[in-house]
């Protein structure tokens, strides 16, 4: 529709321009005078506000009919009516009965109303509830009131929303700050999009704007943390470099170690460069599509359903915005996680290559296949432990003078690896790992450690000597308690 201005709306709604401007200002819409133009959405809101039907007047109570005056009829007429036989109807055309006017003092007779075929007819024994026009009008007014309250609440939220604690309530908002809690609303806030999913042209225009905003957020974070990110990049450089295949390994083993190296880099590297590369590639795609629309073949666009510019095989824009936001906030999450566990992560990267070198050494020594398979199984457990630790901080909780469960399990796994030839190595590993489950009270962590160590329910992993010593200590304690019950006076005398 054409753009509407305030002075036109004054004539259309028959309202004063000051009243319209005051209402728009209360809704957070900036207008200056009666020459200001309003959008289609604002026009519809004004139309719903000022052209709403007025509430219907309450019906007045109907006057009570006057009491009917009873007249005593003559006795003869009453007797005649009871004794006179009925006459048969004359043969011929039937005359239409005329409604006679009621006589003075006589109550009017009710007239038969024509049946409304549009109303649902009730079957015998069934009651149909008909909603009156007054009730429908009341429901419409309540619905409209709820709509206006929702619009007002939304406008208040937009007006008072601040992207960070230092942002002003009014005026232009600054670029959002990249934090682990960044949300999609902050990325899209104060950014104008014209219904991006309504057409391909609007979609790619919105994608280009979204990529530009994401670039600014990511680059602002990189500039403010350049030294820390450089240090983080240097620490993860060994796993970020290209994997060098070893001739002594099979193709499957090289593929396994390469995938593990990439996983460690994605887990502990900040990933700002990778996210920027993906943003840039999508921005180029969006810009190319925008230019294509400027010289498009309209006949191909109209007649070919598989034309690239009219294809509907695109991810919805809100889903794309959420994915971009999640990728951005992942950079901040890994950044803060690294600096909270810098020493631990450096050790993990170093141990990863120790595991690979140890496997290569076993193959050079001609170790049996069973030992190689066991070593590789433990190496996979190490990777699974690291991956679980990266998203579950409960394994990193700190207790006074006690190592974290992750560090304990990592050391137990390394001791098992270095003593695989010992027949008690596996039992000792499971026994000590079983003790770690006693300090974790969350079901998720308990189940992970239980499966990680390969524990079985109802199995005692102590050595025979430990079991015998525990039983002897238990028996001695029971004997002492029994003796104390039999001779309580001896203890009293000693005191």
Image (spheres, helix red, strand yellow):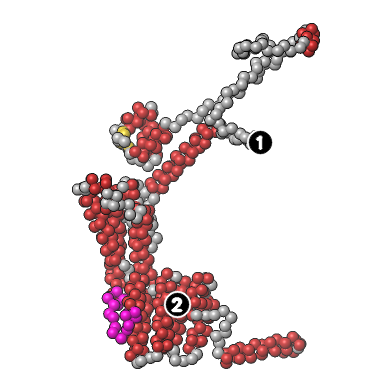
The vertical placement of 310 against 484, above or below, is above
Residues in magenta? 238-254
Say whether residue 321 is left or right of residue 302. Answer: right
Q: Is residue 206 left or right of residue 381?
A: left
Q: Quadrant of the C terminus?
A: bottom right
Q: Position of residue 13 (x, y in %)?
A: 38, 29
Closer to us: 120 or 21: 120
Q: Which residue occupies the extreme front position in the image? A: 91
Q: Visible in this render: residue 41?
A: yes
Instruction: Tell me residue 52's x, y (percent).
Output: 44, 32
**68 sits to left or right of 35:** right
Which numbered tag is attached to residue 406? Answer: 2
Assign the N terminus to one quadrant of the image. Answer: top left
In three-dimensional space, the C-alpha distance between marks 1 and 2, rounded to whole angstroms, equals: 74 Å
Q: Residue at x 74, y 10 (%)?
A: 71
Q: Is residue 134 above or below residue 489?
A: above
Q: 357 or 149: nearer the eye?
A: 357
In this rendering, the answer to whether 270 lies above or below 373 is above
Residue 438 lies in quadrant: bottom right
Q: Is residue 362 above or below residue 53?
A: below
In percent of width and height, residue 66 lies at: 67, 16
- Which numbered disc, 1 or 2, marks the residue that appears first in the sequence? 1
Q: Secondary structure at mark 2?
A: helix
x then y, percent, for residue 322:
37, 57
Query: What's the mark number on residue 125?
Result: 1
């Amino acid at each position: 529709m054409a753009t509407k201005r305030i002075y036109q709306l004054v004539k259309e709604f028959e309202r004063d321009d000051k009243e319209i401007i005051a209402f728009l200002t209360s809704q957070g819409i900036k207008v200056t005078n009666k020459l200001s133009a309003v959008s289609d959405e604002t026009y519809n809101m004004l139309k719903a506000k000022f052209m709403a039907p007025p509430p219907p007047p309450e019906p007045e109570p109907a006057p009570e009919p006057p009491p009917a005056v009873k007249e005593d009829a003559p006795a003869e007429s009453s007797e005649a009516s009871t004794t006179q036989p009925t006459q048969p109807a004359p043969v011929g055309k039937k005359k239409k009965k005329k409604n006679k006017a009621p006589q003075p003092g006589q109550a009017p007779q009710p007239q038969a109303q024509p049946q409304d075929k549009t109303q649902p007819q009730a079957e015998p024994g069934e009651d149909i509830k008909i909603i009156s026009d007054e009730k429908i009008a009341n429901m419409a007014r309540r619905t409209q009131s709820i709509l206006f309250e929702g619009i007002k609440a939304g406008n208040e939220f937009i007006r008072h929303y601040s992207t960070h604690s230092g942002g002003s309530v009014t005026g232009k908002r600054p670029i959002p700050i990249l934090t682990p809690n960044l949300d999609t609303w902050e990325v899209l806030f104060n950014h104008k999009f014209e219904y991006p999913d309504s057409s391909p042209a609007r979609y790619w225009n919105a994608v280009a704007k979204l990529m530009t905003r994401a670039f600014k957020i990511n680059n602002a974070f990189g500039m403010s943390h350049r030294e820390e990110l450089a240090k983080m990049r240097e620490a993860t450089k060994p796993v970020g470099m290209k994997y060098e295949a070893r001739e002594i390994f099979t193709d499957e083993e090289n593929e396994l170690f390469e995938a593990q190296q990439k996983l460690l880099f994605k887990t502990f590297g900040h990933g700002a460069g990778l996210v920027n590369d993906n943003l840039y590639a999508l921005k180029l795609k969006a810009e190319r599509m925008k230019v294509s629309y400027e010289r498009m073949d309209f006949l191909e666009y109209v007649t070919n359903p598989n034309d690239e510019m009219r294809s509907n095989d695109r991810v919805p824009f809100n889903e794309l915005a959420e994915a971009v936001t999640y990728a951005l906030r992942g950079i901040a999450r890994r950044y803060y996680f690294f600096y909270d566990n810098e020493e631990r992560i450096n050790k993990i990267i170093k141990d990863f290559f120790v595991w690979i070198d140890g496997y290569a050494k076993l193959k050079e020594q001609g170790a049996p296949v069973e030992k190689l398979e066991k070593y590789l199984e433990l190496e996979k457990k190490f990777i699974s432990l690291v991956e679980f630790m990266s998203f579950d901080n409960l394994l990193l909780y700190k207790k006074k003078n006690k190592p974290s469960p992750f560090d304990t399990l990592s050391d137990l796994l390394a001791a098992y690896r270095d003593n695989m030839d010992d027949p008690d190595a596996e039992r000792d590993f499971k026994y000590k790992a079983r003790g770690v489950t006693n300090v974790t009270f969350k079901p998720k962590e308990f189940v992970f450690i239980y499966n990680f160590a390969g524990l079985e329910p109802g199995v005692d992993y102590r050595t025979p000597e430990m079991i015998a010593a525990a039983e002897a200590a238990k028996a001695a304690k029971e004997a002492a308690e029994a003796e104390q019950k039999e001779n309580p006076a001896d203890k009293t005398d000693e005191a």
